[in-house]
Image (cartoon, rainbow, N blue to C red):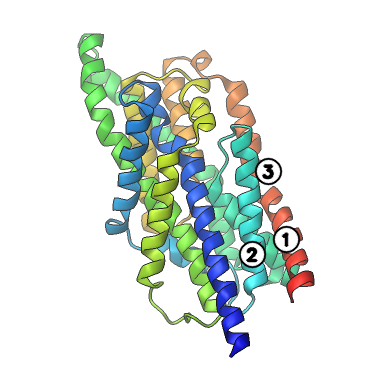
Amino acid sequence: METVQAALWVVILLVALALIFDFMNGFHDAANSIATVVSTGVLKPAQAVVFAAFFNFVAIFIFHLSVAATVGKGIVQPGVVDTHVVFGALVGAITWNVITWYYGIPSSSSHALIGGIVGAVIAKAGAGALVSSGIMKTVAFIFVSPLLGFLLGSLMMVVVAHIFRRARPSRVDKWFRRLQLLSAGAYSLGHGGNDAQKTIGIIWLLLIATGYATTADASPPVWVIVCCYMAIGLGTMFGGWRIVKTMGQKITKLKPVGGFCAETGGAMTLFLATTLGIPVSTTHTITGAIVGVGSTQRASAVRWGVAGNIIWAWVLTIPASAFVAAVAYWVSFRVFD
């Protein structure tokens, strides 16, 4: 009886740690949802975070749990995961998030989590325990999501510029201040829909590994879904202001029309990825869209040095979080097993 209770307490503590990661995901990635709408002056920061948090949670009613299924069942071979692996994965992801938040670098919470899972699993059972198709799909979208965001953001900007070429700039600005509320809401839906499901997936992985759920279950428990969407929404409400400044002002100077095009292009990318069950980075997506919008004006409108630093953070995210996760797994296994 005591052993069962101890196991239950371990599961409860790991679920709490996963929700802390989810909260930090919202906190860290709030910039992705609100940077453009704040930097263009459409909403004040306090209004923007509440607005984004609301749509983060509303996503629970919009999207199927395809991404959660990929993380929960499509990254690692069944039977390999245990509490030490989950602990290592979460510590790796949280550590990388804290480091990049501190330095104001918009890295990917999503890929930090995937990297954490990969590192902890390799430390336990080697690379053969990974599901190559799930890993390759995720890695491919490290490149696909910003490129698609870039393409859709720039195309939106070109189309809008053509449609409103004869309109007065002041009138265009007035219209798109209103329209940007729609695009920001859509992007926040995509953010909540894709990112909350990653935490749902790792908690589901934990519950399967500890016998509190089975691989035959069609979906995770309702309490897991609700808690994860609430956690990411609360994290967004607190906002990561260091990263908001980088995303909203340092890459390129945005006007409401540019903010609308970037958010719309990014939202379309997230909706597609979530429907396909692919865990993508909202950071990569919106950065690509912002760069795409800026590049339609002139190449010099984009601060390529800042964008280059962000790309380096993207490249390092998975290996860095994987390394920390592997160390955390080893410590957990040695101390607590």
- Report if residue 184 is visible in the image: yes
Name the disc covering residue 328, or none: 1
Residue on which the image places disc 3: 316
SS assignment at label 2 = helix
Residue 112: percent from the left, percent from the top? Answer: 60, 51
Callout 2, which amino acid?
Phe
Q: Residues within 10 Å of mark 1 (few under 14, many from 20)?
A: many
Left or right placement of residue 242 versus residue 99 in this view: left
Residue 65 can be seen in this image: no
Precedes in sequence: disc 2 or disc 3? 2
Asked if disc 2 and disc 1 are in contact, CB closer than 8 Å, the reply is: yes
Sequence-wise, which precedes: disc 2 or disc 1?
A: 2
Query: Which tag is nearer the camera, tag 3 or tag 1?
Result: 1
For this rendering, which residue is in front, 269 or 180? 180
Residue 213: numbered disc? none
Q: Is residue 4 left or right of residue 229?
A: right
Kindly state the secondary structure of the residue where label 3 is placed: helix
Q: Which residue is mark 2?
A: 87
Residue 258 versus residue 315 in the image, above or below = above
- What is the C-alpha distance between the residues marked 2 and 3? 21 Å
Disc with the residue nearer the chain's start (3 vs 1) = 3
Q: Amino acid at mark 3?
A: Leu
Q: Residue furthest bottom?
A: 1
On the image, the x and y values in percent for residue 315 come to 65, 42
Rendered image quadrant of residue 4: bottom right
Could you say where residue 305 lies in the image, as x and y percent from the top left? 62, 22
Separation (CA) of disc 2 from disc 1? 7 Å
